[in-house]
Image: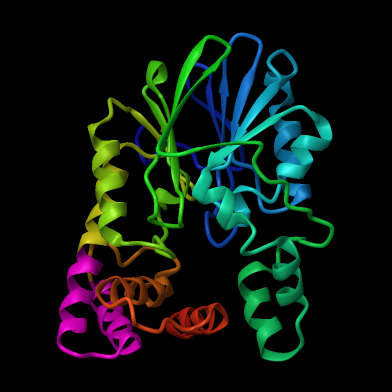
């Protein structure tokens, strides 16, 4: 599957019984999901950021899932744009099994929908800041539905006679990232281990774990790669993300070792990224501020990372014209 494949809103069949639900433009909150269809049952890879978006997705999938109902949901990680819609699936099918890694299940409680609702509605500069990132989404009334099945490292499931491999590769993007591999379709759903056309954001790290996750995917026999954000890709997309992470890890490490302040380092590396032909067209380039903080924290566990509001403020500042 080439990176030039059609990138439009909706359900796309990407292989035998494998579908991707895409949400352009792939920026903040506009995540992808997946549907793996077997004989008489389906597995949903991730839900969306709010109930309305998830409902629209499930309606779009109905032509497939009427004959093969969704019996299992896999949340690839704890970010709300991949799990806040769980409740809509449960409303339609109360006995659905929601699966995630133990680390993901634990982390889900850290940022409940009520927190994002409050930040979006906050007065003054904080409200304006968070609405600039998440103002398109509706968090009021969203109740987070946690996993009913958890696992560590790996879980093999059968979906209507098809083998599906859940492989935990975190901590990387978050504390417990999982990729979903469908061997018979040579397809992998990566969650936010891949951003295509957008800058990866390393909330948890270390970056070396994320690089190792890319290496693992490159070792799989895959043809189609469904990223957490952005258009469909193939192994070239995996390599591009690996190159970015390796570049940032090396550049941030050298500046840490030279005693440079983390935000100064982020600005400095950001200038390099802005002229690098490999990365200069990627969106959300302000995420370099978070990524450098993660490198610094990995190198020095005593490094004090700013709170999440300040991290969003810094990302916005870097992207301001």
> Measuring 34% from the left and 82% from the top, which residue is drawn there?
302
x and y percentages locating residue 190 in the rendered image = 43, 41
262 in the magenta segment: yes
Residue 278 seen by the camera: no
In which quadrant is the N terminus drawn? top left
Residue 167: % across, % down: 40, 35
Magenta-colored stretch includes residue 62:
no
**Residue 64, placed above or below residue 285:** above
**On the picture, is 79 further left or further right than 172?**
right
Tell me the residue at 34%/35% (across/down): 2
| In front of the other: 4 or 105 | 105
One can see residue 71 in this view: yes
Q: Position of residue 106 (x, y in %)?
A: 57, 53
Residue in the image at 26% along x and 42% along y: 236
Report the span colored magenta: 247-275
Which is the main secondary structure of the residues drawn in magenta?
A: helix
């Amino acid at each position: 599957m080439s990176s030039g494949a059609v990138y439009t809103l909706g359900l796309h069949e990407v292989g035998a019984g494998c579908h991707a639900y895409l949400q352009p433009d792939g920026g903040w909150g506009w995540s992808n999901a997946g549907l793996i269809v077997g004989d008489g049952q389906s597995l949903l890879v991730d839900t969306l950021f709010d109930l309305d978006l998830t409902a629209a997705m499930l309606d779009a999938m109905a032509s497939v899932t009427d004959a093969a109902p969704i019996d299992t949901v896999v949340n690839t990680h704890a970010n709300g744009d991949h799990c806040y819609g769980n409740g809509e699936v449960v409303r339609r099918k109360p006995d659905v099994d929601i699966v995630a890694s133990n680390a993901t299940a634990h982390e889900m409680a850290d940022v409940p929908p009520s927190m994002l609702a409050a930040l979006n509605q906050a007065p003054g500069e904080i409200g304006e800041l968070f609405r600039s990132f998440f103002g398109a989404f509706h968090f009021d009334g969203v109740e987070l539905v946690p996993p009913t099945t958890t696992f560590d490292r790996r879980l093999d499931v059968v979906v209507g006679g098809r083998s599906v491999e859940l492989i935990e590769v975190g901590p990387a993007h978050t504390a417990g990232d999982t990729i979903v591999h469908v061997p018979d379709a040579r397809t992998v759903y990566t969650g936010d281990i891949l951003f295509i056309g957008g800058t990866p954001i390393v909330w948890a790290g270390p970056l070396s774990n994320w690089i190792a996750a890319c290496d693992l995917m490159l070792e799989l026999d895959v043809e189609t790669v469904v990223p957490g954000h952005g258009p469909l890709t193939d192994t070239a997309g995996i390599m591009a993300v690996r190159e970015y992470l390796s570049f940032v890890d090396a550049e941030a490490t050298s500046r840490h070792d030279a005693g440079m302040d983390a935000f100064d380092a982020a600005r400095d590396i950001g200038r390099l990224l802005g002229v690098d032909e490999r990365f200069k067209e990627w969106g959300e380039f302000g995420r370099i501020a978070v990524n450098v903080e993660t490198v610094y924290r990995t190198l020095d566990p005593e490094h004090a990372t700013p709170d999440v509001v300040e991290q969003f403020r810094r990302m916005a500042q870097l992207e301001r014209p």
